[in-house]
Image: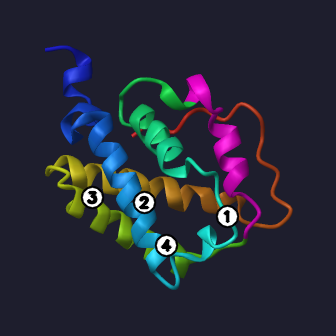
Amino acid sequence: MTPEDTSLYAQLGGFDMILAVTHRWHALCLADPLAGHPFEHGVHPHHSERLAAYLAQALGGPPLYTAGFGDETAVQRLHACNGEHVELDEACLALFDRALAEAGAPEPAARRVSAYFRAATEAQRQWASGDAEVPDGLPFRYA
């Protein structure tokens, strides 16, 4: 058994499962009056695919995000300076858990991915203030 076989990425079901989760999460957020707010003003047309690439890498899969889209600093800058919004975060996190379940993500991997996504979401709050300056060279946030 290789390290890739034992990664959280593999335990979850690989890229196809991650993409199914991100597509479902995006759809659930768009349908929710609170969670839909960040998506109302437009997002990248391939947001779900980009998030899937990020999660794949974070969970021990191939380095898809950093190979094609950017680094951790770029991710944090995309989400920075929007103020603290705990209620919105909680709504989005609940829908992420629902997306994991509805996509058929296996346990206990789904719980571990949920915990990672929560920790990453909460960590982004350090850049919430309108004058936050995200530094260059942040290390990638692995699960």
Q: Quote the CA–CA distance across marks 2 and 3.
A: 13 Å
Q: Quote the CA–CA distance across marks 4 and 2.
A: 19 Å
**Which corner quadrant holds the C terminus?**
top left
Q: Quote the CA–CA distance across marks 2 and 1.
A: 23 Å
Q: Residue at x 65, y 32 (%)?
A: 70
Q: Magenta stretch: dominant SS?
A: helix
Q: Quote the CA–CA distance across marks 1 and 3.
A: 24 Å
Q: Amino acid at mark 2?
A: Arg
Q: Position of residue 122 (x, y in %)?
A: 52, 61
Image quarter of residue 130: bottom right
Q: Nearer the viewer, mark 1 or mark 3?
A: 1
Instruction: Indicate which disc residue 127 carries.
Output: none
Q: Nearer the viewer, mark 2 or mark 1?
A: 1
Query: Where is mark 4, residue-wise?
Result: 30
Q: Which sits in the foreground, 44 or 14?
A: 44
Q: Amino acid at mark 3?
A: Leu
Query: Where is mark 3, residue-wise?
Result: 100
39 horizontally vs 110: left or right: right
19 horizontally vs 103: left or right: right
**Closer to the N terminus: mark 1 or mark 3?**
1
Span highlighted in magenta in the image? 66-82
Query: Where is mark 2, residue-wise?
Result: 118
Q: Callout 4: few (<14), some (14-19), or many (20+) C-alpha neighbours within 10 Å?
A: some
Q: Residue at x 26, y 29 (%)?
A: 7
Query: Where is mark 1, residue-wise?
Result: 42
